[in-house]
């Protein structure tokens, strides 16, 4: 019972979406059923994302409670979650039941600053605090890649040499100064790199990987629909 | 200890500093080295250019803030190109972290340049979870997936959405992405609903996209900041990508230099060790 | 350039502080970095909650149910809520139905999408003419693609030992893969550097302008 019902649900939902592919959505009831499932998927998917955040808060709150190492930083994480989430969750109009109660207590002038729209506190926190940090976190990888280029990228054998040679060619081709340098050898060289390296060797390998990965994903999908793959259900 | 051994044990922070300086100087002293166009970028530009004026197009903001330096100039250049042709733009994001907020900020900023009105000339649908379901759902009814726009206004109250009910009412999907959502725009929306998809992606994703481009599943491609600079050049509006190309050049040259020095040091030390053994 | 308002100056300096506090890690780990890092993690998690609350729970669930009378949306709502049963080990089995719905329906979409959207078009565009009358360049490109796709697929096929013909083809495959990975590496370097350029552009142009205006 605890496993059978979920397997039936997965089978029915998956099969309906597969079958719907073969019918025109407007001529058969299956089109409506598909629309309903898709709508439900977006709703259930939303809850799944929130579940992840609840886990983060729980783990960090526990560490703060126990005053384990670095508890102050973890407290800051928890405070930041609420600072971002709570103003965003407040009602943005008086038209809803919750909104009319909320704005009978708090001034109407707060309306523009709550929710997720432009000029909201949420919007401001994202644009001026969260986004700059996210950009910087990833920008720091440029330093690591420079260090790795110096310390780790060694032409130890023929394959590694080929990789380094192609990488150098592509790095030159993708920037104006490098492209001008390549043109010193032949005016057609940048074009050849685009056509044969990117459009030839690279396309062939990427295609092989895409086909291989797609076959794997298709077989995994089939296993889930048929109830053979059940690990996602946990113990 | 000879020079090669010293170089081998150099503190990595010197390399970090070199990298920072290689970007800092060209950012201060911009030379504007000429930018050459690639056929794939021209293909994307031409695909938009050939659409009838006032067409309805979808522009996706499928990127996190982490890739803004590469993707935002693409979105800005695309908006300028489309609004120059008086197109109606529907934006959405399949990214739950930043995408909808970025779409809101960027579209409203560029709309001011062209006197475009929200709800009439553009609409931001925002975000809904599970992008494969979203992409399928938009084919039958936009309203079933997005009953309101990003800020909660019902779609029925937005004049633009009176005539736009599904993909059937759109001419082109211009997907700017830093992750796999573009694969799904291609393999679901282009493959099953037959609407052309063009894309601007981060450099990390670009090599994979060539395979879709070659197969005709993708109509044009911008790869990384260089791709964005190419689009800026075609649109004729200088932006941060074009300005960044000098720094990009210098940093690439530094990386190549570091690879060469690192390898020469490696072989010199290996030869020395071999000689000592003998 | 127009002069910045007080708020604009504040925003620019706040961003500059955050950028520099994170960059300070490149020198060594420190308290400023740690604080920014943890605030960043929290704000990002909070962003998800705010977004999902407004765009999914309010716009897609609560408003249609109460304003339009679409009562049947209670079912996906319940399925979503059942997911939280995972937080209680004793009751975690209840979340299985929601997960099964999510996984099953996603698998249904994926199965068609991978076969129809990836495999068929990609295989089809590999079935190219190798006729030399198409011209040297076109034939060469077609040969590269055909040989490359087959040898790459064989390299990643581990159910049969890579000896004999399989071994030789897999060997060719690794050469193709090295070229493609080299191209990928070149692009990756480009991408990472672009992100740093974005940060430096902010520090030089925006923060620099703010400093100039203040001092």
Image (tube, rainbow, N blue to C red):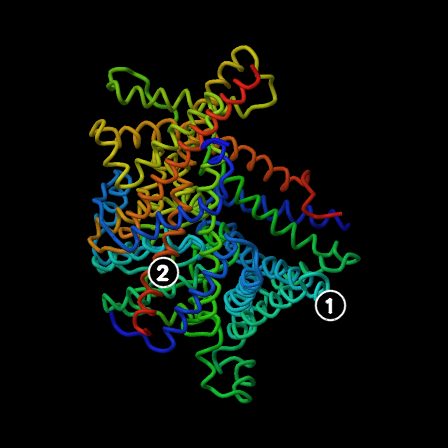
Q: Position of residue A162 (x, y in %)?
A: 42, 25
Q: Kindly check if marks 1 and 2 are in contact, taking CB atoms under 8 A apart as contact.
A: no
How many numbered markers are drawn?
2
Residue C151 visible? The answer is no
Q: Residue reaching furthest top? A: C164
Q: Chain of mark 1?
A: A
**Position of A49 compared to A153: left or right?**
right
Q: Residue reaching furthest front? A: B1
The disc placed on residue A65 is 1
Residue B227 visible? The answer is yes
**Position of C53 compared to B164: left or right?**
right
Viewer-nearest of discs 1 and 2: 2
Placement of A85 over or under B187, stated as above or below? below
* Label 2 Cα neighbours within 10 Å, binned few <14 / some 14-19 / many ≥20: some
Which quadrant of the view contains residue B84? bottom left
The answer to which of B33 and C211 lies nearer the viewer is C211
**Position of B16 compared to C87: left or right?**
left
Which quadrant of the view contains residue C124? top left
The answer to which of A163 and C52 lies nearer the viewer is A163
The disc placed on residue C202 is 2
The answer to which of C104 and A143 lies nearer the viewer is A143
Q: SS of the residue at dot 1?
A: helix
Q: Position of residue C32 (x, y in %)?
A: 54, 63
* Label 1 Cα neighbours within 10 Å, binned few <14 / some 14-19 / many ≥20: few
Q: SS of the residue at dot 2?
A: helix
Q: Position of residue A228 (x, y in %)?
A: 68, 38
Placement of C2 over or under A175, stated as above or below? below
Q: Position of residue B135 (x, y in %)?
A: 45, 51
Q: Name the residue: 49% across, 88% down.
A: A107
Placement of B186 over or under A156, stated as above or below? below
């Amino acid at each position: 019972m605890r496993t059978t019902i979920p397997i039936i649900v997965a089978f029915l939902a998956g099969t309906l979406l597969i079958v719907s592919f073969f019918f025109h959505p407007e001529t058969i009831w299956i089109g409506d059923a598909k629309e309903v499932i898709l709508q439900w998927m977006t709703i259930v998917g939303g809850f799944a994302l929130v579940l992840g955040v609840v886990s983060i808060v729980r783990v960090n709150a526990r560490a703060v409670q126990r005053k384990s190492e670095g508890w102050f930083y973890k407290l800051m994480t928890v405070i930041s979650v609420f600072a971002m989430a709570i103003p965003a969750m407040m009602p943005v109009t008086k038209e809803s039941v919750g909104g009319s109660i909320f704005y009978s207590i708090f001034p109407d002038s707060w309306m523009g600053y709550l929710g997720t729209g432009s000029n909201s506190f949420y919007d401001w926190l994202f644009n001026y605090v969260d986004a700059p940090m996210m950009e910087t976190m990833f920008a720091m990888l440029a330093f690591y890649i420079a260090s790795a280029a110096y310390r780790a990228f060694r032409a130890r054998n023929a394959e590694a040499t080929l990789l380094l040679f192609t990488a150098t060619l592509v790095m030159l081709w993708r920037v104006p100064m490098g492209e001008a340098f390549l043109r010193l050898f032949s005016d057609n060289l940048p074009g050849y790199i685009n056509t044969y390296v990117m459009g030839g060797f690279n396309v062939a390998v990427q295609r092989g990987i895409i086909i291989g990965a797609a076959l794997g994903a298709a077989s995994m999908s089939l296993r889930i629909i048929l109830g053979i793959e059940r690990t996602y259900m946990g113990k | 200890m000879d020079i090669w051994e010293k170089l081998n044990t150099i503190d990595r922070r010197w390399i970090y500093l070199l990298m920072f300086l290689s970007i800092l100087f060209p950012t201060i002293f911009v030379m504007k080295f000429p930018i050459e166009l690639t056929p794939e970028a021209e293909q994307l530009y031409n695909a938009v250019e050939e659409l009838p004026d006032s067409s309805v197009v979808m522009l996706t903001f499928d990127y996190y803030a982490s890739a803004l330096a590469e993707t935002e100039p693409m979105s800005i250049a695309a908006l300028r190109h489309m609004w120059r042709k008086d197109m109606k733009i529907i934006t959405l994001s399949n990214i739950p972290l930043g995408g909808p907020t970025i779409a809101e900020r960027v579209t409203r900023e560029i709309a001011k340049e062209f006197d475009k009105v929200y709800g009439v000339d553009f609409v931001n649908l925002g975000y809904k979870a599970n992008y494969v379901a979203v992409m399928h759902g938009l084919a039958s009814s936009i309203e079933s997936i997005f009953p309101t726009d990003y800020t909660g206004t019902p779609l029925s109250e937005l004049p633009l959405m009176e005539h736009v009910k599904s993909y059937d009412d759109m001419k082109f999907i211009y997907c700017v992405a830093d992750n796999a959502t573009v694969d799904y725009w291609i393999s679901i929306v282009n493959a099953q609903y037959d609407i052309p998809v063009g894309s601007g992606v981060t450099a990390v994703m670009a090599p994979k996209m060539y395979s879709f481009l070659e197969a005709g599943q993708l109509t044009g491609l911008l790869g990384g900041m260089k791709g964005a600079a190419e689009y800026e050049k075609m649109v004729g509006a200088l932006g941060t990508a074009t300005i960044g190309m000098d720094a990009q050049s210098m940093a690439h040259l530094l990386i190549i230099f570091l690879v060469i020095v690192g390898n020469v040091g490696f072989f010199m030390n290996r030869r020395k060790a071999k000689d000592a053994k003998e | 350039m127009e002069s910045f308002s007080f708020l604009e100056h504040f925003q620019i300096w706040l961003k500059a502080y955050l950028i520099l506090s994170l960059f300070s890690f490149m020198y060594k780990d420190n308290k400023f970095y740690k604080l920014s890092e943890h605030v960043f993690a929290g704000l990002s998690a909070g962003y998800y909650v705010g977004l999902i609350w407004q765009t999914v729970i309010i716009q897609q669930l609560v408003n249609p149910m109460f304003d339009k009378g679409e009562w049947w949306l209670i079912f996906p709502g319940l399925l979503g809520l059942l997911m939280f049963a995972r937080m209680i080990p004793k009751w975690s089995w209840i979340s299985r139905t929601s997960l099964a719905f999510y996984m099953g329906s996603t698998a249904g979409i994926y199965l068609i999408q991978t076969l129809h959207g990836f495999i068929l078009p990609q295989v089809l565009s590999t079935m190219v003419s190798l006729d030399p009358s198409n011209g040297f360049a076109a034939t060469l490109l077609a040969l590269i693609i055909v040989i490359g796709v087959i040898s790459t697929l064989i390299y990643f096929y581990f159910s049969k030992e890579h000896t004999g013909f399989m071994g030789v083809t897999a060997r060719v495959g690794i050469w193709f893969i090295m070229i493609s990975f080299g191209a990928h590496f070149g692009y990756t370097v480009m991408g990472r550097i672009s992100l740093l350029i974005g940060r430096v552009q902010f520090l030089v142009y925006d923060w620099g302008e703010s400093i100039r205006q203040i001092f």
